Image (tube, rainbow, N blue to C red):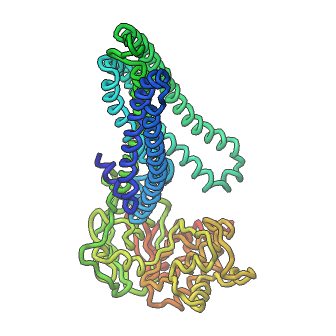
Amino acid sequence: MKDIKLIFKSIRQYKFYSIFTPLLMIGEVAMEVCMPFVMSLVMDNLEKASTTGNLNIIWPYVIILICMALFSLTCGALAGRFAAIASTGLAKNLRDDIYNKILTFSFKNIDKFSQSSLITRMTTDVSNVQMSFQMMIRIVIRSPLMFIFSIVMAFISGGHIAWIFIALIPLIGFGLIFIFKKAIPIFRRVFKRFDALNQSIKENIDGIRVVKSYVREDYEIEKFNSASDGVANELIRAEKILAFNNPIMMLGINAANLLVCSFGSILIINTASIDSTSNEVIWGALSVGQLSALLTYGVQILMSLMMMSSIFVMMSMAFEGFRRIAEVLREEPDIQNPEAPIYEVMDGSIDFNNVNFKYSQDSEKNALSDIDVHIKSGQFIGVLGSTGSGKTSLINLISRLYDTTEGEVLVGGKNVKEYDLKTLRDNVSVVLQKNVLFSGTIESNLRWGDEFATMEELEKACDIAQASKFIHSNPEGFKRKIEQGGTNVSGGQKQRLCIARAILKKPKILILDDSTSAVDTKTDALIRKRLKESLPNITKIVVAQRISSIEDADQIIVMEDGKINAIGTHDELLATNHIYQEVYETQTKGGKK
């Protein structure tokens, strides 16, 4: 119920439609239940009308039936329209709320949910919630009301014979409960299989070039088909079980009709009489019209029970979606603004004071241990280390993409946890190892750095990043279209555009996380030279695999196994540090063989 309440907060501007739909359903059900009773009066008066030839006694009932039918039709039509508006509105708001929530997550929060799972929650789960909500404000209201009202009217019309329906309900209910107990666990497993299926799709689309270059299409098709078959097989298993739902209900309806007709006919024959003077039938305990109404109420009772059973299945699926969506909405961002944030970064100095960091509290080993580094504002710092040595983890703490487990990180002399997040990240510009471009134009991508930047500022940033030449080689220039993920530009061009985008933020700290790996050494050297000349007061941190990218740095930090192995200049490390020496030997002398 907590999950449902949380999700229903997203109804917001659609409250009117959500509240008014059930009221309309009450009107529709009331008319539908009363109509068989009025019809029974018509049937009971037909013989009198045929005997006397006076049809006037029938017309009032006919007019009442027409009015009731029109009223029921109007309520039903409006309820359907309002329910559609309310459910689609809830789905729209839910997607907005989930998306907005995800954007507040830290990297740690995002790591908790897989990307494929988040996509499933925003699509499949939201669609299930939308359908279930539409059912809740219509069918979930209609079916119980129809069930209760029909039972009441059955007793009014048929007296003790209505107990036949009451006797059959537990038998049918037992069968339905047995079916659902078997089917519901299967539906819950399907959601996990959907996540796996989406993950397979995402991996194949993201890595389509690798798939094709290694000619692995057949293997990936087989893997996808296996995941798809898994979903299909689970759904088939569930549907096979649910297939017994209709036969059980039809058995109940036919049994009820048979018993009611049998006992009702006997009762009519034994209690009815004929007036000797008027030759009219005098009904006893039950009339033909009442029997007809009783049969109609029996169908309504059992059909509403069947609808409730279908609702139960749908709601069981939806509740799993409710839980998964609520799990995202309830997730609190691991990193939040402090109560009294600082809105100004004084300079680009950076201090790591006895920092330890692990990605999860359950992790046995720290990703970073005993980090104690002090960087002056405006310095050019290189970071070198093998894969998994902790380089990216180190720089992620500066812009507070993660928080330290122990110790503190200072920027401009203040703990990063004291800053307003937007202020901090505007002043610490990071070109991540896996930076991406978005669909649009080169200009629109660059304006992520500064949406109000002038064309002169765009040109300057691209000149520093060595991107101007390839931009202007195309007739469209800055208006050149960029496909999703930047797939229509080379890796080196993508990296240079990302560097230019970061420069446009005018940060006090610029971090390049292996962001020139796809450019040639000449262009790499030109980028470093222009960064030094054009941005002398900005602290520059370059994470690199190539020593040539950082050999002219003021200080080079050598990382190993999450710890700082050494700090020094190129010459100092070349003379004293064996890791640096090995890398240098491999990249210079080894490369000349």
Viewer-nearest residue: 491 or 24: 24
Snapshot quadrant of residue 175: top left
For the image, the number of numbered tags is 0
The vertical placement of 369 against 136, above or below, is below
180 relative to 490, above or below: above
Q: Looking at the image, which residue sits at the far front?
A: 277
Residue 5 at x, y percent in the picture: 31, 51
Residue drawn where x is 37% and y is 47% of the image: 22
Farthest left residue in view: 339
Name the residue at 57% across, 46% down.
Answer: 200
User: Is 203 situated left or right of 131 in this image?
Assistant: right
Query: Which quadrant holds the C terminus?
Result: bottom right
Is residue 6 at all visible to an observer of this figure?
A: yes
Is residue 114 in sight in this rendering? Answer: no
- 232 sits to left or right of 161: right
Residue 334 in which image quadrant:
bottom left
The quadrant of the rendering that contains the N terminus is top left
Q: Position of residue 245 (x, y in %)?
A: 47, 25
Residue 162 x, y percent position in the rendering: 33, 20
Q: Residue at x 43, y 81 (%)?
A: 509
Please name whichever residue, 553 or 188, is drawn nearer the observer in this view of the structure: 188
> Is 350 placed above or below 301 here?
below
Residue 302: x %, y % from top left: 41, 26
